[in-house]
Image (tube, helix red, strand yellow):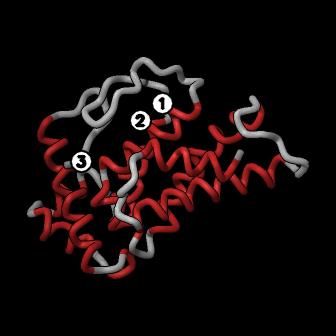
Amino acid sequence: MFYFYLEIMDKRVQKTINAVYAAFAEVLKEKDFADLSVEDILKRANISRSTFYAHFKTKGDVLDSVSRNIFNHVFSHALEQEESHDFSQASILDYEHLFTHVLYHLRDEKELIQSILATSCRKDFLNELREHIAPLILRCLREGFFVQKEVPEELQLRHIEESFLATVAYWFESGCEKSPEEMVEAFLCLNR
C-alpha cells in the first residue's frame, strides 16, 4: 500500500498513482531500472498510455514522484498522527524524531524502496534523500546535536550524510528487521 501525503487528492488520481507505484515496484523486481520501459509499467498497472502520461512523462518521473511524495511530507514539518507512527506531539526541533520519521516513511514503502535500492536507480534515489537530509544535518551540526569535530564543517556534513545513507541501505538490505528507533540509535552512535 502506498501512502500519499497530499492533503487533497482525487480518489481516481490516487488509485491511478497507486497502480503505477505498485507496477513500478513489481517490474523493478524483474528488471533493472535501465531496462524497464513505460510499457512495462502500463501493462503491469493495467492502465492506458494516456492515463499514465496524464501524471508522468517518463519512468524517471515515477521515481522522482516516489521521492517527492515521501520526502516532501517528512521534511514539511507537518507533524500529524499517521497510521504507522505518531510524531504529532514532537517538536520540529526534536532531531532524533525527525530522523526516525524519515525511516518510518521509508519502511511504510518497504517493498517499493527495496525494489529501488536493488537496481541502478539506487544512486538517484539516495541522492534525492541526501538533498533532503543535508539541511537537517547541517542544522543539527550548527545547533550542537552532533558534536563539532576539528574538521571542516563541509567534511563533517558529508560524513554524516553518507553515514545516514549507509544506515538506510544497510537497514533495507537486512530486511528492515530492526525498528526505525533502533536504526536511528545506531546511526547516532556512529556520529556522536
**CB within 8 Å, label 1 to label 2:** yes
Residue furthest toward the right? 150
| 166, above or below 96, in the image | below
Instruction: Give the residue furthest to the top.
Output: 89
Going by the image, does 30 lie left or right of 157? left
Q: Does residue 65 appear in this view?
A: no
167 or 192: nearer the viewer: 192
Task: Name the kind of residue labelled 1 in the image.
Answer: Ser
**Snapshot quadrant of residue 142:** top right
- The residue under label 3 is 2
Report the residue at 59% width, 24% height from top. 93
Question: Marks 3 and 2, Cα distance to the nearest angstrom?
Answer: 13 Å
Q: Quadrant of residue 42?
A: bottom left
Q: Which of marks 3 and 1 is nearer the N terminus?
A: 3
Q: Tell me the quadrant of the picture where the C terminus can be found.
A: top right
Where residue 87 sits: x, y (%)?
A: 41, 26
| Residue on which disc 1 sits | 76
Q: In this orientation, which residue lies closer to the viewer: 102 or 192?
A: 192
Helix, strand or loop for disc 3: loop
Q: Can residue 70 be seen in this view?
A: yes
Q: Can you say whether 142 is above or below 17 in the image?
A: above
136, above or below 54, in the image: above
Q: Residue 73 carries which label?
A: 2
Three-letter amino acid code at the position of disc 2: His
Q: How far apart are marks 1 and 2 (CA)?
A: 5 Å
Residue plotted at (52% across, 60% down): 126
- Count residues near mark 2 (Cα–Cα under 10 Å), then give few for <14, some for 14-19, many for 20+: some
Residue shown at 17%/58% (left/top)?
Answer: 50
